[in-house]
Amino acid sequence: MRQPIRVSISVPYDLRPAAEADDVSKSINYGTLSKCVLASVVEVEDHAPPASAAATARQRQFRSLEQLSGHIFATCFAAFPEIERMTLDVVKPRALPYADGVRVLSSRARDGSRLASERFSIQRLACNVLVGLNPCEREDKQLVYFDVDVSTTHHHHPPSSSSSPVHSQDQPQTLGEDDAFDFRGLAKDIRQVRASRSPQDPCAPG
């Protein structure tokens, strides 16, 4: 089943030529960029019989947010030669039953190199815990929300000069399933945390 995904695209770009000439053609057309990304996640079936109607289209499938991000990076770099680097913020609202969503934030250069450590977030993870300094606060569990943000470092080497970088939408640069961050495992670990000290201890962790 299709799932809702929110994608924010940030492109560093010099806007002064477009501003000085009052000419939007010297800027990045965000409408074209948006349409290009949306079209790239639809896979066209071009082997329909000639007598039939127009070729049908089906939705591409992605095994992880990392793979989707890699596909969008490759699509944007291929469609816009003037883009040298960009940042993607990809959010999946329905990824976990006890959280508002999960998020992958990454920045790439045209040659495929990462410009910063990738960040993985769980938004508003709900947990029922005993927490508080007063004994009355430790009689019943209370609903607490966590925003979890994790940074990871990947050792990635850009392609050598002898090999051409990926600039074709037919061959998007994607990450494998093994590179996907385990959001579910982290959320499960956090929700299973228990205080290691006695509830009567006012300094006991909650």
Image (tube, rainbow, N blue to C red):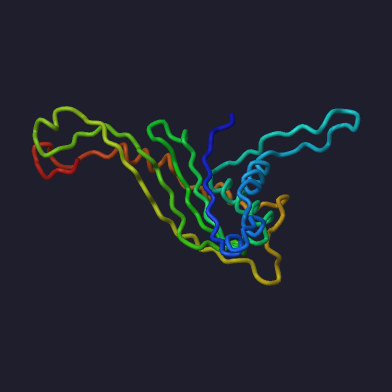
Instruction: Answer left or right for 168 relative to 9.
Output: right
Q: Residue at x 14, y 32 (%)?
A: 138
Q: Residue at x 62, y 64 (%)?
A: 111
Examine the rendered structure and indicate whether residue 122 appears above or below residue 179: above
Closer to the camera in the image, 8 or 154: 8
Q: Quadrant of residue 84?
A: bottom right
Examine the rendered structure and indicate whether residue 98 appears above or below residue 103: above
Closer to the camera in the image, 171 or 35: 35
Closer to the camera in the image, 81 or 17: 17
In x, y percent, where is residue 29? 63, 51
Q: Residue at x 10, y 30 (%)?
A: 136
In x, y percent, where is residue 38? 64, 41
Instruction: Answer left or right for 48 relative to 76.
Output: right
In x, y percent, where is residue 149? 37, 49
Quarter of the image containing the C terminus? top left
In x, y percent, where is residue 189? 34, 41
Instruction: Answer left or right for 127 relative to 178.
Output: left
